[in-house]
């Protein structure tokens, strides 16, 4: 409880404890550093009417380091179970601000749904019809941890206006951007993996939910004549350093063998001289 990350996450869990019409998020019962979140697709877009579900993995250094964000159900905008490259995610720790929060990240995700992929890591470019189809199917998605996701949000918009805190998070979410793939690849892409490895969790891996037929993000086109043919792996060529190391091992073995032969020769000579000496002593 003395950890700054735990204190911050406990406070955010209290702020997000009640679901809204637009979004909801909560930590896992046995792991405060992994959250599941749900949000409704933005209106006047291909995602309207859809409900989308995802995971947020937070590092032990939160809020000084950014979280990793991924979606779990097919949506046509982001790849499944792949960390999304945003200025608020673990791909870009240099642009992370401790004032951003889990709610800020969710509101940013909602805002990014209708935007273009622009080559960002984890982004997809589906047709409008495909996205609308996936939006309808998303209502039946059932998370192994959270259950049927459509039951996690309120059915109607509340009459009361949002709090100042929510309005502040909306303004902060507008500062977040999607990073192009080329720019993202120049940074250390292993940062998010390091953050996840530091997460105090013993088991956070879940099975990948089934992808509908329209979700072909992971499909790789192949030539009909080459299906099932695996190219032979190239022969391994030892590096110069490795060759020198192997030669050194050979030289060391040769030296040890020569030394053993010399020792044996000296021992035989010594034994013979000793026998000769004993024979002469016996004569006198």
Image (spheres, rainbow, N blue to C red):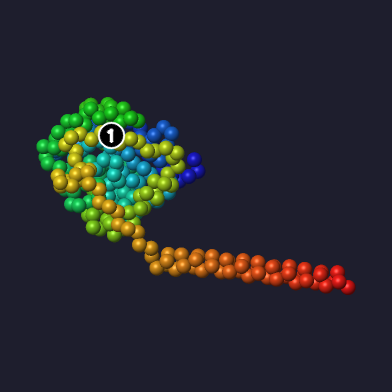
Left or right side of 15 for 174? left
In the displayed image of the protein, which residue is found farthest to the front?
Answer: 283
Examine the rendered structure and indicate whether residue 119 appears above or below residue 205. Answer: below
Residue 265 appears at what percent x and percent y? 65, 69
Residue at (21% x, 29% y) in the render = 139
Residue at (16% x, 36% y) in the render = 214
Is 215 or 148 nearer to us in this picture? Answer: 215
Q: Residues within 10 Å of mark 1 (few under 14, many from 20)?
A: some
Residue at (27% x, 47% y) in the render = 84
What is the quadrant of residue 200 in the picture? top left
Examine the rendered structure and indicate whether residue 139 appears above or below residue 2. Answer: above
Left or right side of 200 for 73? left
Residue 37 appears at what percent x and percent y? 31, 36
Question: Pointer 1: what residue?
Answer: 209
What SS does tag 1 mark? loop
Examine the rendered structure and indicate whether residue 180 appears above or below residue 227. Answer: below
Whether residue 124 is visible to the viewer of this picture, yes or no, is: no
What is the quadrant of residue 55 in the picture? top left
Residue 153 appears at what percent x and percent y? 27, 29
Is 103 or 128 nearer to us in this picture? Answer: 128
Q: How many marks?
A: 1
Whether residue 266 is visible to the viewer of this picture, yes or no, is: yes
Residue at (77% x, 68% y) in the render = 275
Residue 54 appears at what percent x and percent y? 29, 38
Quarter of the figure that contains the C terminus: bottom right
Examine the rendered structure and indicate whether residue 166 appears above or below residue 242. Answer: above
């Amino acid at each position: 409880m003395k950890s700054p990350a735990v204190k911050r996450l406990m406070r955010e869990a209290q702020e997000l404890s009640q679901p809204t019409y637009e979004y909801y998020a909560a930590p896992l019962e046995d792991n405060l550093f992994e959250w599941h979140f749900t949000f409704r697709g933005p209106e006047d877009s291909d995602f309207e009417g859809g409900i989308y579900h995802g995971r947020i993995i937070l590092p032990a250094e939160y809020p000084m380091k950014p979280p990793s964000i991924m979606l779990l159900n097919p949506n046509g905008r982001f790849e499944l179970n792949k960390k999304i490259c945003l200025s608020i995610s673990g791909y870009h720790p240099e642009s992370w601000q401790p004032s951003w929060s889990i709610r800020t990240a969710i509101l940013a995700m909602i805002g990014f749904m209708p935007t273009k992929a622009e080559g960002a890591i984890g982004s997809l470019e589906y047709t409008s019809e495909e996205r609308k189809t996936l939006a309808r199917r998303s209502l039946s998605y059932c998370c192994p941890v959270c259950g049927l996701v459509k039951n996690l949000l309120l059915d109607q918009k509340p009459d009361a206006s949002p709090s100042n805190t929510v309005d502040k998070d909306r303004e902060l979410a507008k500062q977040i951007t999607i990073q192009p793939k080329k720019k993202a690849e120049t940074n250390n892409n292993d940062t998010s993996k390091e953050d996840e490895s530091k997460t105090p969790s013993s088991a956070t891996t879940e099975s990948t939910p089934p992808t509908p037929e329209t979700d072909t993000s992971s499909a790789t086109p192949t030539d009909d004549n080459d299906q099932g043919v695996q190219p032979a792996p190239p022969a391994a060529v030892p590096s110069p350093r490795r060759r020198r190391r192997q030669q050194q091992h050979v030289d060391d073995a040769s030296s040890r063998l020569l030394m053993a032969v010399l020792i044996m020769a000296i021992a035989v000579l010594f034994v013979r001289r000793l026998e000769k000496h004993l024979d002469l002593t016996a004569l006198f």
